[in-house]
Amino acid sequence: MTTLLPKDADNNTIPALRLRSGGAHTLNVTGANVRNNIAFNEETKVISVFATAPIYLAFGDASVTATTADHYFPANTYYDIAIGGGAGKGAHNAYIAALRTIEDCTLYISEKE
């Protein structure tokens, strides 16, 4: 599907995706591994994440778990992450797992389209 993205005053493309209706997820991240119970929509290729404290993140299928060897994600940072999908584009990571670093927190996830 062809998409026309908005442009800034210098005619540079501004990457913009809208929030998917029904695609908001909230995870309470603790010392026990947690993952989203509802898979991301198969059409979702990008998610945004925001954590209220530092955490570790992992992506995969319904059995994914996060460990201290996974990606460190800092607190109070809003970040877009590609989760794959689409014909010939590789695996679609429909689940995210999280583990706290030092304190319990909340992970907010938004699916984008």
Image (cartoon, rainbow, N blue to C red):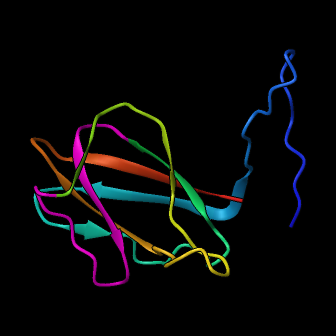
Image quarter of residue 8:
top right
Q: Quadrant of the N terminus?
A: bottom right
Quadrant in which the C terminus is drawn = bottom right
Residue 39 horizontal side relative to residue 56, left or right: right
Seen from the viewer's position, the closer of residues 37 and 55 is 55
Percent position (x, y) of residue 104?
A: 18, 47
Residue 16 drawn in magenta: no
| Image coords of residue 15 (percent x, y) | 72, 39
**Majority SS type along the magenta span:** loop
Q: Position of residue 54 (x, y in %)?
A: 23, 39
- State the count of labels: 0
Query: What segment is highlighted magenta in the picture?
Result: 51-69
Q: Residue at x 36, y 50 (%)?
A: 107
Q: Where is 26 relative to 5, above or below?
A: below
In percent of the image, x 22 and y 72: which residue is there? 65
Q: Residue at x 90, y 47 (%)?
A: 4
Q: Position of residue 37 (x, y in %)?
A: 40, 77
Give the left or right position of residue 17, taking residue 1 as reference.
left
Q: Nearer the viewer, residue 87 or 63?
A: 87
